[in-house]
Structures are given as C-alpha cells and as structure tokens.
Image: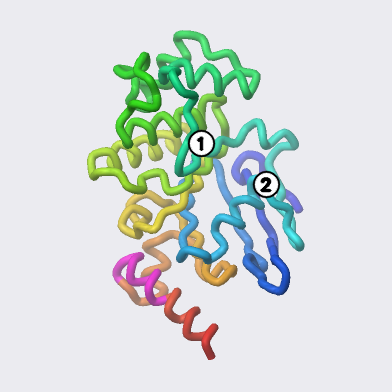
Amino acid sequence: MIISKSEMLLQAVQLTKSYGSRTVVNQVELQVFAGEILAVIGPNGAGKSTTIDMLLGLRRPDQGNVAYWRKDYLAHIGVQLQTTPFFPGLSCIENLRLFAAFYKKKLDAEKGKKLLRFCGLEEVAQAEASRLSGGQQKRLAIAIATVHEPELVFLDEPTSALDPRSRLEIHTLIRSLADAGTAVVFTSHDMEEVQKLAHRVAMIHNGSHIAGGVPEQLCEQHGVGHLNELYLKLTMEEATVACT
C-alpha cells in the first residue's frame, strides 16, 4: 500500500471488528488528507467510535489495516475527547505545559502565548482550567490536542452542548487548523455544522461505510437539498434493508 506523503496522511482498508458474533465495523475504508476537514457521521452505535479507535491504534482490527504517513505517527496525532481531564488547581498555561511535557516538548512562554492566542484563550491564561466556561474548556482541550503541533487531529463532538457563540468560535478554530495544514477529523450529530465545516464526510451506519465525499456533491447525487436530508434518507434505507 503506497501513501503519498505530500497529501495523504492515513489510509484505512477493509477495517473489520467483531465482538463475539456481532460485527460492529464491517470493511470500512477511509482516507485522510493534509489540510482537510473530514467529518465522520452516523447514528449512535453505528461503529464510528470503534472505527476511530482503530485509526488511532487503540483497538486492533480483526481484518484490514491502516497505513500512516510516517512510522512515528502517534507522536504527530492529537486527540480531543468529549471531556478532557484537566489537572486540578492548574491554570490554562500550566495544563498546556504539562501536556507538552508528555510529548517531550518544552512549551516556552512565547509558544504558550501564541497557542493560547490561536485558541482565543490569551486573556484566561492564568485562570484555573476547571473553572472555565464550557466553550473555553472545549478550546483549551483543542489547544492541548495541538500543543505538540500534530499533523493530524481527531476531535470528538467538539461543539456538543455549547451555545451558538461558543460553537462559532470552535468552528473558526477548526478552520484555522486546516488552513495551517493540519488534517482535522471530527464527529458530530449536527448535519448543519457538518455541511458548513467539512470538506468531506464519511457516513457510517450498521458498521459499514455507506457514503463518502464532498457534502454538496453527495446531496446532488442523491437528489436532496441538504446533508440532513441525505443522512435521514440513507440511514432509513439501511435500516429498511437490515429489517428485510
């Protein structure tokens, strides 16, 4: 399997994972390119989390494989979970320095200030991380995920439970990461958000990759006007097939 290091960062081929007699991921194929925003979408229990776990190397596939753009890929991947366990009593900048140390990186004052500014947190640099607002904590979680300047970032529902202004700030941050050349893979149940943000989508349902591509082109191919309509149409079709 050949990967162009100048463009493709990750290529997953026929990823399959079963637990007992239940197949939760069935021959899923995905590619991630530098500087793009890829949304992985699908209903709860569709197999998204297991797929991403295999992409990150947290779970080993029963079949298939994942090829990466470099051997030490784990050192160049950032991950933001839905909840980030900030260290109690530490400020934003102190949390950033500590997480940077986990990657054997030294975060000097200038780099720390630049990262906080990039994430819109410069004014709360000395505030205790656990006391920040929900939107600020999400942005700090993304700052932590990018403190080692990764080439590929995974964001798990980065705007869930946020107010409209905080969501807009996260959207701006994600676009800025992509503009800087970082590949961003995120999950979301908000199709309005996905249509606005994602360069490409990968829709997973019942463990299978049922659709993928540029949102507008996919909608046109399936004769619908919005990604939300496409989502409902394809997941309903899959559910009907599964019941027959």
Real-space CA distance between mark 2 and mark 1, rounded to the nearest whole angstrom: 21 Å
Prevailing secondary structure of the magenta residues: helix
- Residue 182 x, y percent position in the rendering: 51, 36
- Residue 233 x, y percent position in the rendering: 39, 76
Q: Nearer the viewer, residue 227 or 58?
A: 58
Question: Residue 169 falls in which quadrant of the image?
Answer: top left
Q: How is the image coloured?
A: rainbow
238 vs 110: above or below: below
Amino acid at circle 2? Leu
Q: Dot 2: few (<14), some (14–19), or many (≥20) neighbours within 10 Å?
A: few
10 vs 153: above or below: below
Q: Which residue is mark 2?
A: 58
Q: Nearer the viewer, residue 49 or 174?
A: 49
- In the drawing, does residue 31 fall left or right of residue 19? left
Q: Which residue is mark 1?
A: 182
- Residue 124 x, y percent position in the rendering: 32, 19
Q: Nearer the viewer, residue 213 or 167?
A: 167
Residue shown at the point (34%, 26%) measured from the top left:
131
Q: Dot 1: few (<14), some (14–19), or many (≥20) neighbours within 10 Å?
A: many
| Image marks 2 and 1: residues in contact by CB distance under 8 Å | no
The disc label shown at residue 21, or none: none
Q: Secondary structure at mark 2?
A: loop
Q: Which residues are magenta?
A: 225-233
Seen as rendered, the residue at the extreme top is 109
Amino acid at circle 1? Thr
- In the drawing, does residue 38 fall left or right of residue 5? left
Q: Nearer the viewer, residue 176 or 77?
A: 77
Residue shown at the point (64%, 45%) measured from the top left:
56
Q: Secondary structure at mark 1?
A: loop
